[in-house]
Image (cartoon, helix red, strand yellow):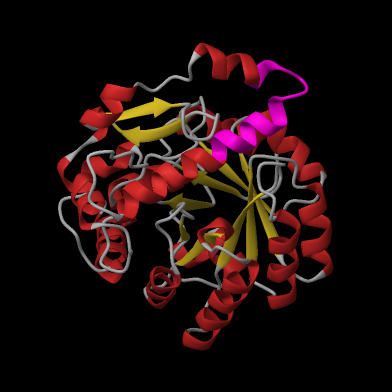
Amino acid sequence: MKLNPSEFALSKMLNIEFPIIVAPMFLVSNKEMIIEAINAGVTGAIPALNYRSVEELRTAIQEIKKETKGSFGINIIVNKSNFLYKDQLRVCCEEKVDFLITSLGSPEDTIKMAHENGVKVFCDVVDVKYAKKVESLGADAIIAVNKEAGGHSGPTSYMELIPLLKAECSIPIISAGGVGNGLEVRKMLDHGADGLSIGSMFIACDESKVSNEYKQACVDYGKKDIVMTTKLSGTPCTVINTPYVQKVGTKQTGFERFLNKNKRLKKWMKALTFVRGSKRLQKAAFSSTYKTVWCAGPSIEHVKQIRPMKEIVSQLIREYEKGE
């Protein structure tokens, strides 16, 4: 017997109607998107790094709480490339967001402090080994990042990853990647996922503040146009294969790879690559320029127009219910 959407573990944990997180997307996610997502019956998260200062982050959290009563979260990069990590965590705990999503590092300190303040923690993972590790540290749920995910994707398909994690872990598994319509939502949930984290299909929403060129690229390009690059953060990241990306290539230079392998310089090189890559993404995301480096995942295949957030969510739910 199929579960009602409100009966999935993610729905129960966050008291939402439908088990979907509008995934945190660097430079794309904002408070307007989250408010509309909540009002449409789902939830969402924003990367803490989308705000220049921790006080701007605090203000955004407070404004979301004023506008809506639903659950929402913040995504924090918990490795040494994020120099604001500790302050971001402190603000999220003080303002008591409903959940945190940790990425690219050990979540141990985050889990401890969050739980002391009544905040849930969901951890990005790409394999069973790390999933079992974060569960042992007390994570409340796992974000299972598969090979179809946008941004920093994993190496394994959802068909393999979800059953592996369900067999080895006892906490909820939230699948991330490969969802662009309601039929794919149903496939993931039927395959055992306790909820979904969906990002790329929401880039082209009215509420996003990125450029119309970025949004239109999500309409014009498709699954075959997504490529992996290591030039932005040092970690493989999916981008749209625009003419500019084709020109500059997707691999680090030999010198950059050498610095990344040097034990003394590795931390600083990774941080420098991240900062430089972030600035390039920001310039491309918010302005019209031929130097277009736009992050997105294969699910843009299903993006056919720029629409309000509530319409995108409503269509997902209708397609899920119809099984189409």
Q: On the rendered structure, is 128 left or right of 238?
A: right
Q: Position of residue 201 (x, y in %)?
A: 31, 51
Name the magenta segment's main secondary structure.
helix
Q: Position of residue 92 (x, y in %)?
A: 68, 68
Q: Position of residue 240 (x, y in %)?
A: 29, 35
Magenta segment: 260-274
Check residue 198 for magenta coloring: no
Q: On the rendered structure, is 196 left or right of 131?
A: left
Check residue 269 for magenta coloring: yes
Q: Is residue 9 visible?
A: no
Q: Is residue 146 above or below residue 25?
A: above
Q: Position of residue 236 (x, y in %)?
A: 49, 28
Q: On the rendered structure, is 107 left or right of 227?
A: right
Is 87 in front, or is 41? 87
- Rendered image quadrant of residue 115: bottom right
Q: Residue at x 67, y 16 (%)?
A: 261
Q: How many numbered discs sit on the rendered protein?
A: 0
Q: Residue at x 82, y 46 (%)?
A: 137
Q: Residue at x 52, y 88 (%)?
A: 66
- Rendered image quadrant of residue 42: bottom left
Q: Is residue 276 above or below residue 138?
A: above
Q: Is residue 177 visible?
A: yes
Q: On the rendered structure, is 303 left or right of 38?
A: left
Q: Is residue 305 above or below residue 103?
A: below
